[in-house]
Amino acid sequence: MQLIDTHVHINFDTFQPDLAAVRSRWQEAGVVRLVHSCVHPQEFASIQAIAGQFPELSFAVGLHPLDAHKWDQQTATQIKFLAGAHAQVVAIGEMGLDFYKADNYEHQQQVFTSQLAIACELNLPVIIHCRDAAPAVRDILQKWRKLHGERVRGVMHCWGGTPEETQWFLDLGFYISFSGTVTFKNAQTIQASAAMVDSDRLLIETDCPFLSPVPKRGEKRNEPAYVRYVAAALAKLRAETIEEIAQKTTQNACRLFGLSL
């Protein structure tokens, strides 16, 4: 069984003491590829260094919406340069909107749109963070398509939206990625969304070191090996085997991010 964790942050300090052991565990769990997200281009060097150690790691470059206040023309130039200069970059992100923790709505939307432009220019998919902002994200993506005549490719990561919102992004051509939150007892809305996503649009992730899944919920640090618990939860919700979920999500990740096994 082969799994792909499509969203990790293993450059965080919490992984420094035992990263080699963390890698051994994800290999034992069948995780054959990982996509490392980026919250600020200043992280790029540390992410690239880890990818130099672990060839199964590909990565993105972008600016998280909660860092939108740090955006300037230099940031845009840096993202564009790094993405174009390194073959291991497979996406722009994570980007998007977070109206839960910040209220600079207009500025977030401007930064989001600027990064969409970079992704489309470089023909790369986007990794979208969307928290309490699904209508605004949908509107931006719809307007982009209307103005530019092209559809943005990408994934709604760590998805927590309703089935109705899920359908919005499926209709826009997006993949939907589920994290450890789908295993939580009170996550009925997320579980309903996970049950309805088309098989060719489904992805899995840990978003580690955050959101440890059941049965590892008590652990403060999540890690890539635990993506198998996300796959198992999806299998139960969708009345499929974990092997079927693994095969489909791995194929989908390879297709979206241009990965090879």
Image: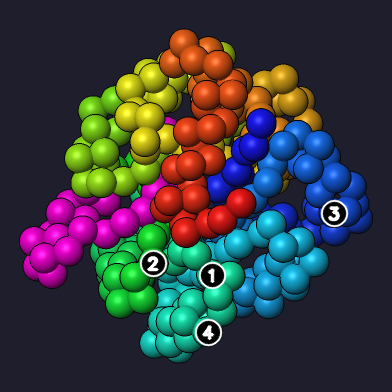
Alpha carbons under labels 1 and 2: distance apart: 9 Å
Q: Answer left or right for 151 relative to 31.
A: left
Depicted 206 relative to depicted 117: above or below:
above
Tell me the residue at 61%/62% (across/down). 58
Residue 104 place in picture, x, y as percent: 34, 61
Name the residue that disc number 2 marks.
124
* Mark 2 closeness class: few <14, some 14–19, many ≥20 residues within 10 Å: many
Name the residue that disc number 1 marks.
89
* Mark 3 closeness class: few <14, some 14–19, many ≥20 residues within 10 Å: some
Considering the numbered disc 3 on the image, is that residue within a helix, a strand or a loop? helix
Alpha carbons under labels 3 and 2: distance apart: 29 Å
The amino acid type, in three-letter code, at marker 3 is Leu
* Mark 1 closeness class: few <14, some 14–19, many ≥20 residues within 10 Å: many
Q: Earlier in the sequence, mark 3 or mark 4?
A: 3
Alpha carbons under labels 1 and 3: distance apart: 21 Å
Q: Quadrant of residue 238?
A: top left
